[in-house]
Amino acid sequence: MRILCAALAASLAITAASAAATLDTVRQRGALVCGVSQGLAGFSNPDAQGRWTGLDTDICRAVASAVLGDAKKARFVPLSSKESFTALQSGAVDMLTRNTTWTQTRDTALGLNFVATIFYDGQGFMVRRGVGVDSAEQLDGATVCVNAGTTTELNLADYFRARKMRYTPVVFEKSDEVLAAYQAGRCDAYTTDQSGLYAQRLKLQDRNAHTILPDVISKEPLGPVVRQGDDAWFDIVRWTVFALINAEELGVGQTNVDGMRTASADPRIRRLLGADGRAGANMGLDAEWALRAIRQVGNYGELFDRHLGKASPLMIDRGMNRLWNKGGLLYAPPIR
């Protein structure tokens, strides 16, 4: 019995040590390193001054705010789809916030954990206007530009095989290479997540000459990824995302967060903002971890509008990404 107890204690000690590893590393370094895309408008894209902007990059900044107290302590490493998981597995980045699709294989076979869904998406197609194609069902025999090593490539094969349609893939590793090939006329259609199609269309010489077909051929839940066996870090990233979603639901945003911490009598808001409860202490953080993330970055709705929605060039409708109580899929467990 003593041997079993000793073995269990040793196992728990090892688990606790590995679970704290990323949090300790980030604190010792004084910076959070996030793997992002190589440039996708609305998600992670450098502006003219080289500052990274987008939903994915602001999720990284929110975690940096919670853990290090400052959103400016987030650093970004641009990665191709092929490089992204290896970079996380090796410890080159602390987390991925790279419009990455949550799948069973990725969540179980790569030593990685998906944290939460921050954008519900689906794969679609873009074609040139005037070619007589208004549905993906009409793409039999088409050449299709696609990213290598992605769920997009697999979904494309599944879609055509299930319908006994023929196609020729034109495959590149980098998204800009795929877009360049499509623009040069090397393929009839370009396929990726619909949000990505809206983003990439902004880069075309005549964006109005191209249309995004209405067909959605897959489920693409996109979200941050961390390494397995790192439960403390998993909790911090997950609950930072949930804090931003809960903040929108409770009407807490960048402009009113400080006032609501002191003035609100709503126990849900008081727990979220650290006035009551032990939400921060339970994760090894201080009481104002979520307050800082909301103050420095915004709630989920503010992030969506800024980068993808009505305040952005993309003008993507919230659709499935509305809150659960407004007809969408976005739902966060309570902080209590």
Image: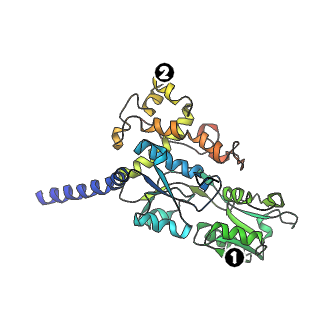
Query: Where on the picture, by quarter, is residue 141?
Result: bottom right
Which mark sits nearer the N-terminus, 1 or 2? 1
Q: Say which element carries label 2.
A: helix
Alpha carbon distance from label 1 to label 2: 58 Å
Asked whether residue 323 appears in the rendered view, the answer is no
Three-letter amino acid code at the position of disc 1: Val
Asked whether residue 209 appears in the rendered view, the answer is yes
Q: Nearer the viewer, residue 179 or 165?
A: 179
Residue at 46% across, 35% down: 291
Q: Is residue 40 left or right of residue 258?
A: right
Q: Is residue 301 left or right of residue 190?
A: left
Q: Is residue 263 above or below residue 280?
A: above
Q: Is residue 55 left or right of residue 169?
A: left
Q: Which mark is residue 336?
A: none
Residue 22 spot, x, y in % from top left: 36, 55
Q: Dot 1 corresponds to which residue?
A: 170
Residue 288 spot, x, y in % from top left: 41, 35
Three-letter amino acid code at the position of disc 2: Ala
Q: Dot 2 corresponds to which residue?
A: 263
Q: Is residue 214 above or below residue 296?
A: below
Number of marks in picture: 2
Mark 1, residues whose alpha carbon is within 10 Å: few (<14), some, or many (≥20)?
some
Residue at 85% across, 63% down: 129
Which quarter of the image is occupied by the C terminus? top left
Query: Disc 1 vs disc 2: Cβ atoms closer than 8 Å?
Result: no
Residue at 35% across, 43% down: 283
Which quarter of the image is occupied by the N terminus? bottom left
Mark 2, residues whose alpha carbon is within 10 Å: few (<14), some, or many (≥20)?
few
Residue at 47% across, 62% down: 107
